[in-house]
Image (cartoon, rainbow, N blue to C red):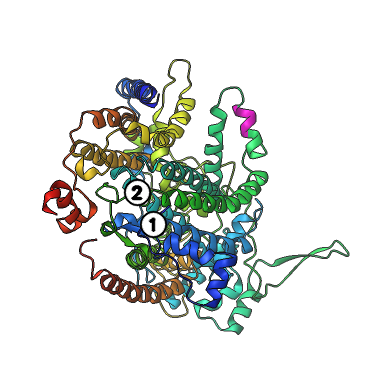
């Protein structure tokens, strides 16, 4: 039965596929897919290196502090960071008192609700609070930044490229795709998936933030610092992970060598395996 | 059943003697994976992957049970509870990465185990039942992995669930009500997430049960081996312990080295970035792709782009995708060659490698966007896939002239076998 019906079933699928293939090929020849502006002008992230890259990479705490400053003074106007708590900032090298001060002075306050009176109010943030949600009424939906570098391919480099990639729409693009003109209220950026985004260039010029450690705040520097910071917010356990990884691999290497020797020893009296 | 020369379990002391009389569990283990199970002496490292698959299941259950202590299966908080695990639970990041990459490791190991079965025709009599149960385990694994991927409730979780449950909608007449019933709604939401979590917790234990049957069925004829020649005599075998416990121990070490390198240094390599974006029913990702281990079957699903007579393209795709696995159930009867091992089947061997390349091509196309040339390539590759199992294999096994087999495993290993000489020339005795 199997040998009778098997080939028939096989041929059935094969013919159906051939039919699909023929139709597809016919369409591909008669109506070739038109190129799109996204397809031709979208760019992959630039090559950017971070201290945390690679198997031996570790976070540069001074850079993370600078990046946090950029987030605080620029990004946090529109973007939330709901998975990060103020207490987490201790990992950037801030003391307990500094973390308390950062929380207290944070612009957006924690909303409170009194269940007895039904009154809504606000209070200052404390270290155990998560960063308060930012409500944005303008055009576009600023995504939460906690996980942004893990939610995009090549995340750190992507954020850096996006922040430094704003430019005039190329004339060549408009010539080839006259309908693809950037709409009013959107901004052209070849690193963004569909080339136009609602966020205007957030890093506008040198010295936009004043770094306390004396680092010169060029646009590129600020972009790199805030990208590094966002790598940390997405994967705060990165240092611990790699450190654990080396210990585990070291142990496993020794164990595997021993297992190999044990195996050789056990099999010594049997030729061939 | 076992071979007559199998070592017999002898309780060493009063306690084990007492236990052996009341509940002979140590005897059972001794006969199953101890010195009481004689195994062909010529198994190569491809025979390591059954044990590794068992290890992966245990790893998934242990990490999964702990993750379930911290995870909340509610569409409102599921995503956040996963981030809570990653950030606030002690070693939570390691557990989650171990579990997510553990699923991939499980599939790597099981695919190698299955292709080992293809090459050495492990499915042939008297081992058909082991093979059939193995296919059941694979189907259960796919269901479990799919539902597990939905739980973090990211964009790919949501849209993957929507696409896969949408497949049931392709069934004529009952399809749409069935889909609504399965999901508990018109789109994946809290009801779906909750039942997926419940089933994701249940199915691994079902898998464990079927694995017990799989191993039980294995112990009746005993393990196959690279020559495909059945065990004839004691010199063909060695006791499982210590010979294969030692060999599998080394294999496990190599496996763990690779697995941990990924876990600790590239834990998101096999995942999709979109799953770090919370599920949003109003925003469809540009490319909806499942996890890598489903890619070959996803390519087959998408290869059917035109209605075939009265059968809609989508239904054809669904039928083909399920048939692509169901066809494995019929392998023992499609491949009629009396020779098992691919080593002695020159023509079969060529087609085996072609199949391996074909599945790799299908996998690549399944992960690529649904655009040309990938659709056309996957159409050709899917065609070969079905023709391979259903047409080529039966023909090859009837026209092929196999190469001569060794007389016994002992001869294959040592180059000569005393009893072979005796059999050929009784006068020499």
**Residue at (62, 25) in percent of width and height:** B174
Any part of residue B272 in sight: no
Q: Which class describes the residues within 10 Å of circle 1: few (<14), some (14-19), or many (20+)?
A: many
Query: Mark 1 — residue?
Result: A161
Looking at the image, which is closer to me, B57 or B375?
B57
What x and y, as percent, mark residue B356? Answer: 29, 42
What x and y, as percent, mark residue A114? Answer: 83, 65
Q: Farthest residue in the right direction?
A: A117
Same chain, labels 1 and 2 = yes
Tell me the quadrant of the picture where the C terminus of chain B can be found: bottom left
Quadrant in the picture for residue A101 = bottom right
What x and y, as percent, mark residue B106? Answer: 43, 55
- Name the chain under label 2: A
Where does the magenta region start and end? B175-179
Q: Which mark is residue A107?
A: none
Which of disc 2 and disc 1 is earlier in sequence? 2
Query: Mark 2 — residue?
Result: A43
Report helix, strand or loop for mark 2.
loop
Quadrant in the picture for residue A126 = bottom right
Q: Which class describes the residues within 10 Å of circle 2: few (<14), some (14-19), or many (20+)?
A: some
What x and y, as percent, mark residue B102? Answer: 45, 58
Image position of B38 (left or right of A78): left
Residue A12 is a magenta residue? no
Is the residue A269 above or below the residue B367 in the image?
below
**Residue at (60, 62) in percent of width and height:** A82
Report helix, strand or loop for mark 1.
helix
Image position of B239 (left or right of B281): left
Q: Are marks 1 and 2 in contact (CB under 8 Å)?
A: yes
Looking at the image, which is closer to me, A121 or B373?
B373
Looking at the image, which is closer to me, B80 or A42?
B80
């Amino acid at each position: 039965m199997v040998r009778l019906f098997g080939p028939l079933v096989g041929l059935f699928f094969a013919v159906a596929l051939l039919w699909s293939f023929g139709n597809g090929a016919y369409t591909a020849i008669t109506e070739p897919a038109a190129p799109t502006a996204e397809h031709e002008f979208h760019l992959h992230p630039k090559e950017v290196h971070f201290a945390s890259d690679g198997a031996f990479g570790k976070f540069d705490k001074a850079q993370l502090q600078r990046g946090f400053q950029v987030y605080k003074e620029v990004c946090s106007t529109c973007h939330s960071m709901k998975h990060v708590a103020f207490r987490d900032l201790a990992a950037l090298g801030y003391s307990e008192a500094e973390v308390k001060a950062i929380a207290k002075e944070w612009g957006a306050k924690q909303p409170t609700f009194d269940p007895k009176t039904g009154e809504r109010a606000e209070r200052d943030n404390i270290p155990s609070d998560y960063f308060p949600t930012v409500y944005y009424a303008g055009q576009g939906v600023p995504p939460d930044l906690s996980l942004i570098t893990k939610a995009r391919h090549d995340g750190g480099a992507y954020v850096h490229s996006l922040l430094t990639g704003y430019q005039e729409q190329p004339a060549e693009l408009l010539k080839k795709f006259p309908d693809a003109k950037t709409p009013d209220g959107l901004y052209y950026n070849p690193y963004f998936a569909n080339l136009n985004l609602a966020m205007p260039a957030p890093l506008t010029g040198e010295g936009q933030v004043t770094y306390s450690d004396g680092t010169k705040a060029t646009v590129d520097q600020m972009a790199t610092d805030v990208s590094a910071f966002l790598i940390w917010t997405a994967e705060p356990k990165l240092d611990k992970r790699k450190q654990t990884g080396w210990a585990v691999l070291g142990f496993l290497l020794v164990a595997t060598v021993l297992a190999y020797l044990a195996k050789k020893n056990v099999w010594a009296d049997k030729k061939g395996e | 059943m076992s071979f007559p020369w199998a070592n017999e379990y002898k309780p060493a002391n009063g306690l084990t003697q007492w236990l052996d009389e009341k509940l002979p569990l140590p005897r059972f283990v001794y006969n199953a994976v101890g010195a009481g199970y004689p195994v062909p002496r010529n198994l190569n490292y491809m025979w390591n992957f059954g044990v590794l698959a068992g290890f992966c299941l245990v790893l998934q259950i242990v990490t999964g049970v702990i993750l379930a202590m911290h995870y909340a299966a509610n569409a409102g908080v599921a995503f956040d509870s996963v981030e809570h695990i990653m950030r606030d639970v002690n070693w939570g990041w390691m557990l989650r990465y171990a579990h997510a990459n553990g699923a991939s490791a499980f599939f790597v190991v099981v695919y190698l185990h299955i292709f080992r079965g293809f090459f050495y025709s492990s499915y042939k009599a008297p081992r058909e039942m082991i093979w059939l149960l193995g296919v059941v385990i694979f189907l259960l694994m796919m269901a479990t992995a799919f539902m597990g991927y939905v739980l973090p409730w990211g964009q790919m979780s949501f849209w993957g669930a929507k696409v896969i449950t949408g497949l049931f909608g392709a069934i004529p007449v009952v399809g749409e009500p069935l889909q609504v019933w399965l999901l508990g709604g018109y789109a994946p939401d809290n009801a779906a997430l909750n039942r997926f979590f419940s089933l994701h917790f249940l199915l691994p234990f079902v898998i464990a049960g079927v694995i017990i049957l799989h191993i039980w069925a294995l112990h009746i004829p005993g393990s196959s081996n690279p020559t495909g020649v059945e065990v004839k005599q004691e010199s063909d075998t060695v006791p499982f312990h210590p010979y294969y416990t030692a060999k599998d121990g080394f294999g496990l070490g190599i496996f763990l080295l690779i697995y941990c390198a990924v876990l600790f240094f590239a834990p998101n390599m096999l995942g999709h970035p979109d799953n770090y974006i919370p599920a949003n029913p109003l925003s469809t990702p540009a490319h909806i792709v499942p996890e890598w281990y489903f890619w070959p079957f996803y390519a087959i699903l998408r290869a059917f782009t035109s209605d075939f007579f009265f059968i809609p393209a989508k239904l054809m795709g669904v039928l083909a995708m399920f048939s692509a696995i169901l066809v494995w159930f019929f392998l023992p009867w499609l491949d009629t060659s009396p020779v098992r091992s691919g080593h002695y089947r020159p023509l079969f061997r060529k087609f085996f490698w072609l199949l391996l390349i074909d599945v790799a091509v299908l996998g690549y196309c399944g992960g690529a966007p649904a655009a040309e040339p990938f659709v056309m390539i996957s159409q050709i590759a899917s065609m070969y896939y079905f023709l391979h199992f259903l047409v080529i294999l039966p023909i090859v096994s009837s026209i092929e002239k196999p190469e001569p087999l060794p007389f016994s495993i002992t001869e294959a290993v040592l180059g000569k076998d005393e009893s072979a000489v005796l059999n050929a020339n009784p006068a020499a005795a």
